[in-house]
Amino acid sequence: MSSAARERFLQQLHKAAARTSTVPPTACLPIATYDRAQRLERLVTLMSAMRTHIEVTTAQDWIGRLQVILKDHNLKSLLYAPETPRGRELSAGWPTDRQNLPALCTWKGRIEDFKDELFQIDAAVTSTIGAIAETGAIVLWPDEKEPRLMSLVPPVHIAVLEADKIYNSFCEIIQAENWPDHMPTNALLISGPSKTADIEMTLAFGVHGPRELIVLIIA
């Protein structure tokens, strides 16, 4: 580029930068609010539409309901995090004689020590920090006690959710759970089993992660 051409180019940039433009005002997006029953109903409806299997249960019965699901699916092994509140409940409520239930496998803490066993496990159960009614998604907050791989590698992912932790919107859960003061390193929003579409727009499930998502809602 010659000096004259470069000068003309720079002059045009300066003129463009000097021009001002106005941004027209836009209306705020409506924020939908639901009561507790509506939040639960909306979450179930939206997630079921994405092939998520949902069971509504109670704090006393969720382990028994989990056992029925595991037997119905003929699963042979179940991974859980023993150091989480849900993991401690599961360990305390699991029968010692197994009763045709899958073997319980505990997360070992380091993927380097566990990767060979991890890819042989049929299912994993994890906790959640809440859910979003507006979009139909559960929210996971993985950490060293219950890492992301637990909800990613096994073919069946079972998540336990408290109905009181279903929020209206993503903004609401951020505020209610006080994310600004302790931001997660890896917050996950999950609406259903893993899915992808090819060039012909054919949707396939279970290609890059669990082929089935089961959510137990403690109401």
Image (cartoon, helix red, strand yellow):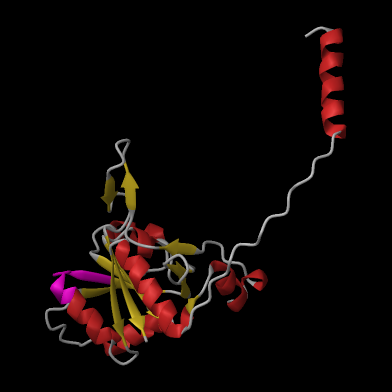
The residue segment tinted magenta is 70-78
What is the x, y in percent for residue 155?
26, 60
Question: Which residue is at the front of the view, 112 or 84?
Answer: 84
User: Dividing the picture into quarters, in which one does residue 36 lie?
Assistant: bottom left
Q: Is residue 179 magenta?
A: no
Question: Which residue is at the front of the view, 58 or 172?
Answer: 172
Tell me if I can see residue 126 in this picture. Answer: no
What is the x, y in percent for residue 114?
34, 61
User: Dividing the picture into quarters, in which one does residue 104 lie?
Assistant: bottom left
**Residue at left 37%, top 69%?**
108
**Residue at left 27%, top 43%?**
202
**Residue at left 31%, top 39%?**
198
On screen, residue 83 above or below 49: below
Q: Is residue 34 left or right of residue 21?
A: left
Q: Is residue 29 left or right of residue 62?
A: right
What is the x, y in percent for residue 197?
32, 44
On screen, residue 103 above or below 114: below
